[in-house]
Amino acid sequence: MLFAVATAGAHARPAAAREDATQQQIEDAINNGANYLLKRQQLDGSWRPDEHKYVSGQTGLAMYTLIKSGVSPRHPSILRGLAYLRAHPPRHTYGIACCLMALHAADPTQHMEEIATWTELLLECQGQGFSYPGGHEDLSLTQYGCLGMRVAEASGLEISSKIWEQCIDYALNIQRDDGSFSYKQGTVATGSMTAAGVAILELGRQALEAKGDLSKRDARVISTAIDEGIDWLAANMRVDRNPDPASQNDNAGHMTRWHLYYLYGLERVGGLTGRAEFGPHDWYKQASNYLVKNQHETGRWGTAHGETHPGTCFGVLVLKRATSPTSGLKPRGAKSYGTDDPEKPLSMRITGDTPLTAWVSSWGDRSREQHEWDKEIGKGLRVWRVDYVNADTGEVLASAEGDPQKPARGERFATQFSMPRPGKHRIVARAYVRPIDDDEGEQVELSSPTLEVLVDGVMTPSMREAIRDLERDELDKTRSTCRASSVANNKHGARFVRDGSHGHGWLSAPNDAQPWISLEPDRPQRADHVVLSPYYKAPDSRTAWGRAKRVLVEVNRAEVGEFELDPDLFGKAYLPLPKTKVIRELKVTILEIAPGTDGGHKNAAGFAEIELQRRPDLVKQRKAEEKAQRKAAAEAAAAARAKRKAR
């Protein structure tokens, strides 16, 4: 099952001083969760689930969550996710439903072709309820099948009333006399499955009612079943576990593993039925109090069982009331950095993302005392210019010119600029002012405190190239046999370099002094470039494992050459072959490794994906560069000869 999630554990945020979370705390938790998801996206646009077959489903769920949290559908992360899903469509019920929800949240009109195609795939998984496809049907799958059908109908597609009726009947047959529901017949009743059963009934009721196909008798039966299910949820209400009143062990796996999945189920029931309370319980207040209190300092939820990506999605969706008709699509609050400090020479403020807007918000008291001219007290300093500088590199990001012939008065010296890559950046404002009674053009430098900003709205050239690469890999035309000199463990086997996802890859054993990996396609493929994708512990932990720094490439058991790689680049390495070759066997040997920081894998290295591409554009570019280099060398040689002759 895709959404295996743990309860929050170590490193949780400290408890709030008051019992109920404030609206600001809730908004902060939503933004922190969204930021966590943004920085965990893989280079190819996907998000990694623990279960490998659900990469597309997890990607759809993350995209849906981000859009619901207020991230624009035009944000680079959403565009990269969409490109990945087009290249790797979902194949399983959970994944299809999550991807349908993501596309509908983004723009159902623009993505109508995919919505129609994926809805057909979804309906192939339906018998009475829904299966994976194949295998058994269960209530959890049926819930997500119904969510997918709901999106399909909201997008303008028609779903047969018979299918809705079958799903309703499937749920009613599982419901117990006490109102509870279980995963399938003969299994234990839980809060997560009772919420799923109620959601199926309410989704089916709404769909049939909209079509005019719901009889009064059926409406009464469904309403009674819904009420009984909600009564059971109220009687067994808790937010720290997935309720199972029959369990003797409060830490049983099904109570902890499906805990956040259950909370999202509560939110769905509340949103679909419009109920703010289940019995005496304000479900949202209790859930939000728990989530805010137990969010990890990184912004995620879930640790004990792993699978923090779906866990974080569920936490954000609950806090955002994602199922409510009025939820979602409200833009995230503008990022804002900086405060005014009269003790500092000047204060800077920054807002936004891409671009960032920066300005001088105030001048310090001492700056005014020392640099305001005698007859201009209170009118401001005379300013030559203000530079906004990358505090780590010294690069001037933007400048705002002033007029040193007169006081600045209320001028803020505002400007905009964009950072070249996502992540944290430190920025400082440096103002150059004209000192009192200066008549020689002297400048005095004043600096603001350094501000750290978080940027996530950048589409880097490497990201753009990765999107284009989704349709360039010649090895996609065939299967490949993959072998390696060693593997760190079974989760990082050689076969993962050809699984179509950057979330899983090959990692060598840490004691392998010269690791290698080989690929043999079933059918030979023509290519002029070998493309290597770096393999990281996570996109936000890129230096934890070792990274390949120098490699040897062999084609058909003949050496092609050695290549230097940039171990710090969040992007692919495009290694040119001397000419287009028919490749029957490819071997890449890592000759040098840049050590990581993770004690267990700091000397291990590998690749997320290995591709073969035909790139006439890169060949043309390389030939032009080589021609320019030869021309420059010839000109330098001619200049040297002329200099010797002049002597």
Image (spheres, rainbow, N blue to C red):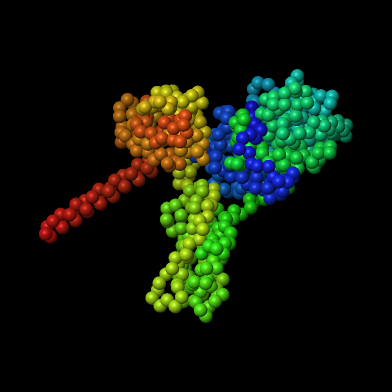
Say which quadrant the C terminus sits in. Answer: bottom left
Residues 249 and 353: in front is: 249
Residue name at image x 47 percent, y 64 percent? 446
Q: Is 633 rendered above or below residue 90?
A: below
Report the side of 40 relative to 179 (left or right): left
Residue name at image x 55 percent, y 68 percent? 365
Residue 523 visible in the shown view: no
**Whole-percent x, y for residue 26 in the image:** 69, 46
Residue name at image x 86 percent, y 32 percent? 224
Say which quadrant the N terminus sits in. Answer: top right
Report the side of 196 relative to 556 (left or right): right
Q: Is 315 rendered above or below residue 525?
A: below
Report the side of 637 relative to 75 (left or right): left
- Quarter where residue 235 is shown: top right
Residue located farthest toward the top when viewing the structure as drawn: 186
Q: Is 407 rendered above or below residue 125?
A: below
Residue name at image x 58 percent, y 41 percent? 298
**Whole-percent x, y for residue 6 in the image:** 64, 31
Count of numbered tags: 0
Residues 612 and 70: in front is: 70
Residues 47 and 132: in front is: 47
**Whole-percent x, y for residue 496 in the image:** 48, 28
- Quarter where residue 349 is shown: bottom right
**Whole-percent x, y for residue 589 in the image:** 36, 29
